[in-house]
Image (cartoon, rainbow, N blue to C red):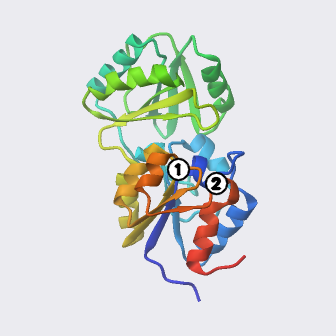
Amino acid sequence: MKRQCKTLYVSDLDGTLLNLQSRVSSFTASALNRLIADGMLFSIATARTPATVVALMDAIEMRLPVVLMTGALTYDLRSHEYLSASFFRSEAVRRIVDVLLQKDLSPMIYYLNGSLLHVAYRRPLSAAQEKFVAERTGSPYKRFIEITRYDVLPDNTILVFCMGEYDKLCAAHEAVVALPGHESYLYRDIADSSMGYLEIYPAATTKAAAIERLAQVAGADEIVVFGDNRNDIPMFEVASRSYAVENAVAETKACATGIIGGNDVDGVARFLLQEWGVKL
């Protein structure tokens, strides 16, 4: 008989559910499939888009929608449909892009065109940006569009994204924070701390808000979350319980209910198996 559960479990991906090779291990996949089949309400919340999440989660029989792009999108992995999306006001994204250009950055503009996610970018790009584009070009879930100017910004903009030297992004972030109409997140690259990512979303876009909406849809009365980075802290604050993996940054650990095993030892999956009293 399947266990009845009103707890929604939500995990971040990179540095949390994914291992050091940025993959879902076979152990984690087997554990989650067993628990979901037993009735566990499980989902993920990540900054990633469907272009990479679909493949990463292919081995897991997800039944609930997932939270993507730090809460800007809710997506059904089974039907490949966007269930909800947050968009910028045109004047807000214009001000943000102008500031980033003044800081000598090349922002990437993520927007929905019909049912397909598009990314507008302008060259020249750094070597890291060229690699980023090359690795994701050709995905059926994302289309890259090269532009020559930023004077006409697309409607339905979801994200303004920059990657580069962390110190340079810090200066840009300070300028962006003073602007209204957005939520912004700056964090270091996991593999190279000298590099970083700046993500700027429409106002009130957070993993926390999206997870609370998902909990209502799922009929859950408790939320338990797992994460490792600063952009996971908002969802820690709304959760009944929150757990940082051992490899999490200090700020995230300080906000957590407890610390569990790291992403390199299937920490999330092992915690869930123990919580549900299941042995593989």
Count of marks overlaid on the render: 2
Please state if 270 lies on the left or on the right of 85 as rendered.
right
Give percent across and percent down for residue 84.
40, 49
Please state if 100 lies on the left or on the right of 51 as rendered.
left
Residue that appears at 60% across and 78% down: 38
**Are circles 2 and 1 on residues that touch, CB within 8 Å?**
yes
Residue that appears at 46% across and 50% down: 252
What kind of residue is marked 2? Asn
Q: Is residue 18 visible?
A: yes
219, above or below 132, in the image: below
Residue that appears at 27% across and 33% down: 181
Earlier sequence position, callout 2 versus callout 1: 1
Q: Secondary structure at mark 2?
A: helix
What kind of residue is marked 1? Asp
Q: Quadrant of residue 70?
A: top left
Give percent across and percent down for residue 53.
60, 47
Name the residue carrying label 2: 263
21, above or below 185, in the image: below
Q: Quadrant of residue 60?
A: bottom right
Label 2 crowd bin: few (<14), some (14–19), many (20+), radius 10 Å? many
Q: Secondary structure at mark 1?
A: loop
Name the residue carrying label 1: 228
CA separation in Å, label 2 and label 1: 9 Å
Residue that appears at 73% across and 64% down: 27
